[in-house]
Amino acid sequence: MKPQVITKENFAAEVLKSEGTVLLDFWAAWCGPCRMLSPLVDEVGEKHADVKIGKINIDEETELAQQFNIMSIPTLMVFKKGEKVKESVGLIPKEEIEALLA
Amino acid sequence: MQMARVLVLGAGPAGISAALYARRGGAQVTVVHKGKGTSALSRAELVQNYYGLEEAVPGAELERRGLAGAIALGISLVEDEILALDYGEGFQGFRAVSPGKTYEADSVIIAAGTTRKAPKIKGLRELEGHGVSYCAVCDAFLYRGKVTAVLGSGEYALHEAEALLPHAAEVLLFTQGEEAPSRLPPQVKVHKSPVTALEGTERLTGILLENGDTIVAEGLFVALGTASGSELARKLGVMLAGQDIKTDAHMATNVPGVFAAGDCTGGLLQIAKAVYQGAEAGLSAVKFLREKK
């Protein structure tokens, strides 16, 4: 799916109450590796129509970043039926992003 | 119209070869290197098995010829230590920062060789991304109000500590037995005893020292020695395979405008390979700059 912005206001509705797979991308504007990872995440979303792609700007969503204990960016998280099932820290190739969804 | 600027990091066979091809392609080329005698080539006692050498030549002599050839072609060679590599204003171009200067470029070729300096610290690998970080610029913000440490003793460690100071509650410096840098801000507390292990399972909680002390810290930023090519590349978002910079056949990394050549890309640590890759990287940089116009 097309990426959407996740905030603390829509987090419950878009992630926790989501029945399917959600791939979250925690990022910030000043982070070079985030800048290179983001388009790869978007490509994965285009390829997998059933996967919801959520972008969380940790600069604006500090509460979410704290809640999920983000200590390094970029961080990717996969949620299934509202539960966190996978986490990956750092820039990874597209194939590895797709492998997180399995 | 201003000539496109290519910045080459490293003046070994890969860096000089890249510089020659980029210069021949019409770019304004600056090579930043850490000084004579710092490249792997200069430390080679004798070079044989290389095309065109009638007799074996000391590595230092071959390096001298390489540098002289570059200077003759109008390439600027600068002795300096690059501490950080970043994008330019509005993500246009690149900026390389040294203790006293900022170098701006439209394209960067990383040919800074390789260092095998992975410290033997228990838990370092396991806690990567959970307290252990290699990029203060990226992650400093996440350590707001926390006790955060830097591992290292040089200008690079100082640079990382300075990036953390505005955010962290306290910044500690672990120098692994070395002297701390002289310009270190007084509020940074120095521990000289070498770090032997890291504590914490889900996330870093403490740092164990050889003298038996355990220091409480939630973050550890690794900045040992001088910043290697791959460490600098990583902060831009260049894809690595282990410590090696990943490139395609044209020596392009995944970051448009950033190329790599020589030992920092892995494979054979040979002059022939470095010279070829440098040539390819130099040509690719020129092609990139032409297409960008």
Image (spheres, coloured by chain):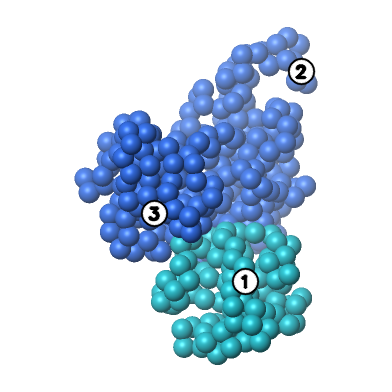
Disc 1 or disc 2, which is closer to the eye?
Answer: 1
Rendered colour, chain B: blue
Q: Which residue in the protein does label 3 denote?
A: B205
- The answer to the question of whether label 2 and label 3 lie on touching residues, with beta carbons closer than 8 A, is no
The amino acid beneath tag 2 is: Asn
Closer to us: B126 or B105:
B126
Figure quadrant of the N terminus of chain B: bottom right
Q: Chain of mark 2?
A: B
Q: Which residue in the protein does label 1 denote?
A: A85
Residue B175 in view of the camera: no
The residues bearing labels 2 and 3 have C-alpha atoms spaced at a distance of 52 Å
Mark 1: which secondary structure? strand
Mark 3: which secondary structure? loop
| Apparent side of residue B113 relative to residue B83 in the rendered image (left or right) | right
Disc tally is 3
Q: Chain of mark 1?
A: A
The residues bearing labels 1 and 2 have C-alpha atoms spaced at a distance of 54 Å
Label ID, residue B49: 2
